[in-house]
């Protein structure tokens, strides 16, 4: 199996095709990248910028360059000795425009007689043999249907007509009643939908890849990539939505000839990747959480908790466990009620459990779940504990929960299979997409795959986690930014400084709230942290984030029921950053106050991520500052020319100043090149202890093994505290051999080395052994 030393994620779309990606391969090679990592490239909804709404899995998307584009990219990668990793989407397909999806069109036209009927997860009994489509503005809109060109039309929406269901003179409503689908009010989707979807997105319909014939149809093109040697590895999107993730991954390994495979799996604290998974690891959110927290000052927690309590008007900070139980229950009773009801309908009548109490109990069990899902029989104990918690929280449901438990524990029972597919949906919507916008004491903590109640990680704990990573998942991906992160790496690095200066932040926030008030204290904390993290940013970007964050939180306004007065105040607050010199000055002054510290956090986190155990990924453009907020902000176009020009300057000998964007490029390129060109320097992992007054501010580790010295990473942590305490002073670290800094060219050791000297130019150093030499 060929494995990458590193990857570089590119978002492939109409405005940046596979041909464009091929053109960038020489730059990526110069940067030090080993494999090119592509977002989904199969044919998707026309105009889709992300590609996760695949409409035809049988071909590479013409808008994204088509098969010719993939061939061009693959050839370019091969010519430069690089591999290709591609993101695939097995859980669902895009059905927003039925005519673009031949499988869905066939299903709507032919119903259960369609050759693609087995591909979709439809509860035909609930729909009376029809697929329910929540497309109408209201149920009264049926009178707006018309027949045109042999199709049923609703404004710009087109639907097929089954054979023999239309005669000249028939009304559109009568024809509609004869179809294998039923158009209904879009609001009814929450509780009456009868097909499985991706989370709560009705335009993404789940498919049943657990059926061999469906797997074969959905992966024929993917298989061609490996048969023809175009691709080297796969990233699997949302495997938790599948009926049998472990079985799917085994099939995928066979299809790909044993290729390198990663899964987009969120691991909760203490949770391990199932051993049954035929893959090399995850896409790196677990690593992101560890890196973030080792650069957060634990001393700031008490003050930020107090600030959170004051903003909420409570005696203490938000209770996160209680919060997520509530948000998950809200999701289960709201936008995912259809999925919960479908589970309840699977309870056999002989068990004597009526629909409503069964649904109530299912929702309560899911709300009590501590992880995304089980993989029975793996996780049976977690399920039992969740049921105990549900019964304790709702004693009135104890009998119903007890009735459900044996059904849910049986891996072969349809309700158990579907429950495992559903629990992760509720977790994702209730936690990532709701609670993460409500739990606002420090924005760094509410990132995908993270546990927000874990405020900080000590260097000692970090080293232990890295040793486990090296032992258990050495080929798992590590990352700091993705197309799904709520805040990109350098925005979080800046926000993390707040933990070192909590009182200054509290005073700054109070001033901002006075100048541009929004009637939701916790939301104000979230918003102003985001603005500081992303600054400077355009009005459009910040307005987009502010609206999305407020609606996702769902406390003061909602997507389905916007509070116009509240949103007007939010808009005015963001506008004030650009229009009110007083507000602009407060933001500018705070950003300037922490700028050097945030830059130190950024390059330190980057070097650690690129040199720690695992396969490091660089998200497109993040070799420069990446201060994007949540999507679509983090999927903006990248100026590769500027990066290439700056890299050429660095390679010509220009040493950038600390704290500059170019210094991050220097760290990124030198670390990537070393990982690719000197893999023998990254075979182990051991912590390195510092001595002296500022020892706690140094994160240091070696990637050597035994008597073989490897690359050494020195990184600054808690830079504001370091500066306030008088700098490095007598702090020293013991080097095992004579070493040279890949960033500056300076040589040190062997023996004790002054950290003030080693980190005199940059907050980080990347040291490599110098054979036979002494400094």
Image: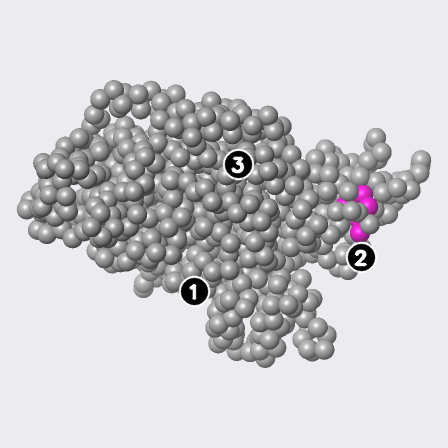
Mark 1–mark 2 CB contact (< 8 Å): no
Mark in front: 2 vs 3:
3
Q: Position of residue 436 (x, y in %)?
A: 42, 52
Report helix, strand or loop for mark 1. Answer: helix
Front residue of 511/211: it is 211
Extreme residue toward the front, this view: 772
Please name the residue that numbered disc 3 is placed on. Answer: 231
Mark in front: 1 vs 2:
2
Extreme residue toward the right, this view: 168
Callout 1 crowding tier (Cα within 10 Å): few <14, some 14–19, many ≥20: few
Please name the residue that numbered disc 2 is placed on. Answer: 128
Q: What mark, if any, has residue 322 been given in the picture?
A: 1
Start-end of magenta stretch: 107-112
What secondary structure do most residues of the magenta stretch adopt? helix
Residue for point 32% across, 35% down = 677
Q: Is residue 111 magenta?
A: yes
Q: Between marks 2 and 3, how big is the CA–CA gap?
A: 44 Å
With respect to residue 322, does 162 lie above or below?
A: above
Q: What mark, if any, has residue 696 been given in the picture?
A: none
Residue for point 49% across, 47% down = 261
Q: Between marks 1 and 2, how big is the CA–CA gap?
A: 39 Å
Regarding residue 219, the answer to whether it shows in the image is yes
Report helix, strand or loop for mark 3. Answer: loop
Q: Earlier in the sequence, mark 2 or mark 3?
A: 2
Mark 2–mark 3 CB contact (< 8 Å): no
Q: Between marks 1 and 3, how big is the CA–CA gap?
A: 45 Å
Mark 1–mark 3 CB contact (< 8 Å): no
Q: Position of residue 410 (x, y in %)?
A: 61, 71
Q: Earlier in the sequence, mark 1 or mark 2?
A: 2
Regarding residue 758, the answer to whether it shows in the image is no
Q: Is residue 659 left or right of residue 22?
A: left
């Amino acid at each position: 199996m060929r494995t990458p030393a590193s990857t570089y994620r590119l978002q492939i779309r109409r405005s940046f095709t596979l041909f464009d990606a091929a053109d960038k391969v020489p730059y990526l090679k110069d940067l030090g990248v080993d494999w090119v990592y592509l977002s989904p490239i199969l044919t998707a909804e026309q105009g889709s910028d992300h590609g996760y709404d695949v409409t035809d899995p049988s071909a590479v998307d013409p808008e994204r360059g088509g098969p010719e584009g993939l061939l061009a990219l693959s050839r370019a990668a091969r010519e430069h000795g690089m591999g290709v990793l591609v993101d695939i989407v097995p859980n669902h397909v895009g059905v927003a425009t039925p005519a673009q999806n031949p499988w869905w069109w066939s299903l709507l036209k032919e119903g259960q007689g369609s050759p693609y009927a087995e591909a979709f997860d439809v509860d035909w009994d609930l729909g009376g043999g029809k697929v329910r489509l929540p497309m109408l503005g209201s149920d009264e809109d049926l009178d707006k249907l018309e027949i045109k060109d042999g199709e049923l039309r609703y404004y710009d929406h087109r639907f097929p007509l089954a054979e023999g269901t239309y005669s000249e003179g028939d009304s559109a409503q009568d024809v509609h009643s004869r179809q294998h689908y039923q158009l209904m009010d879009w609001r009814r989707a929450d509780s009456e939908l009868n097909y499985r979807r991706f989370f709560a997105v009705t335009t993404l319909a789940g498919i049943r890849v657990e059926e061999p014939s469906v797997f074969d149809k959905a992966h024929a093109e993917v298989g061609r990539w490996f048969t023809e040697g175009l691709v080297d590895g796969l990233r699997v999107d949302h495997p938790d939505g599948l009926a049998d993730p472990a079985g799917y991954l085994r099939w995928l390994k066979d299809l790909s000839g044993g290729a390198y495979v990663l899964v987009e799996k969120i691991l909760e604290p203490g949770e391990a990747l199932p051993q049954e998974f035929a893959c090399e690891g995850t896409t790196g959110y677990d690593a992101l959480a560890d890196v973030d927290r080792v650069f957060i000052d634990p001393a700031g927690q008490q003050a930020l908790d107090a600030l959170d309590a004051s903003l909420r008007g409570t005696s203490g900070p938000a209770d996160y466990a209680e919060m997520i139980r509530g948000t998950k229950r809200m999701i289960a009773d709201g936008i995912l009620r259809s999925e919960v009801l479908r589970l309840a309908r699977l309870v056999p009548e002989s068990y004597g459990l009526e629909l409503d109490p069964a649904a109530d109990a299912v929702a309560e069990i899911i709300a009590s779940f501590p992880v995304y899902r089980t993989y029975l029989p793996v996780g049976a104990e977690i399920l039992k504990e969740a049921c105990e918690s549900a019964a304790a929280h709702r004693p009135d449901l104890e009998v119903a929960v007890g009735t459900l438990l044996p059904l849910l524990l049986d891996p072969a029972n349809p309700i158990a299979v579907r429950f495992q597919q559903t629990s992760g949906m509720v977790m994702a919507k209730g936690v990532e997409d709701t609670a993460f916008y409500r739990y606002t004491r420090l924005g760094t903590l509410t990132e995908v795959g993270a546990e927000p109640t874990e405020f900080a990680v000590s260097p000692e704990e970090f080293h232990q986690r890295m040793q486990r990573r090296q032992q258990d998942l050495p080929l798992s991906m590590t990352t700091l930014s993705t197309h799904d992160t709520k805040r990109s790496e350098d925005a979080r690095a800046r926000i993390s400084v707040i933990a070192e200066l909590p009182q200054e932040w509290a005073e700054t926030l109070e001033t901002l709230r006075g100048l541009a008030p929004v009637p939701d204290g916790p939301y104000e904390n979230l918003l102003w942290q985001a603005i500081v993290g992303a600054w400077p940013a355009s009005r459009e970007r910040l307005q987009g984030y502010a609206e999305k964050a407020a609606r996702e939180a769902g406390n003061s306004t909602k997507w389905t029921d916007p509070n116009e007065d509240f949103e007007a105040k939010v808009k005015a607050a963001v506008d004030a950053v650009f229009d009110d010199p007083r507000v602009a000055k407060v933001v500018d002054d705070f950003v300037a106050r922490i700028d050097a510290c945030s830059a130190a956090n950024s390059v330190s986190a980057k070097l650690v991520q690129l040199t720690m155990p695992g396969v490091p990924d660089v998200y497109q453009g993040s070799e420069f500052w990446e201060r994007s907020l949540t999507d679509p902000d983090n999927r903006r176009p990248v100026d590769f020319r500027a990066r290439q020009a700056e890299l050429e300057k660095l390679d010509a000998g220009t040493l950038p100043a600390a704290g500059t964007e170019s210094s991050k490029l220097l760290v990124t390129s030198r670390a990537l090149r070393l990982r690719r060109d000197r893999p023998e320097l990254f075979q182990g992992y051991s912590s390195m202890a510092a001595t002296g007054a500022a020892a706690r501010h140094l994160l240091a580790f070696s990637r050597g093994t035994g008597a073989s010295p490897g690359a050494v990473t020195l990184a600054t942590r808690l830079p504001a505290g370091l500066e306030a305490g008088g700098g490095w002073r007598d702090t020293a670290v013991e080097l095992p051999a004579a070493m040279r800094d890949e960033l500056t060219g300076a040589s040190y050791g062997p023996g004790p080395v002054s950290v003030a000297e080693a980190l005199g130019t940059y907050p980080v150093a990347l040291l490599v052994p110098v054979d036979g030499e002494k400094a």
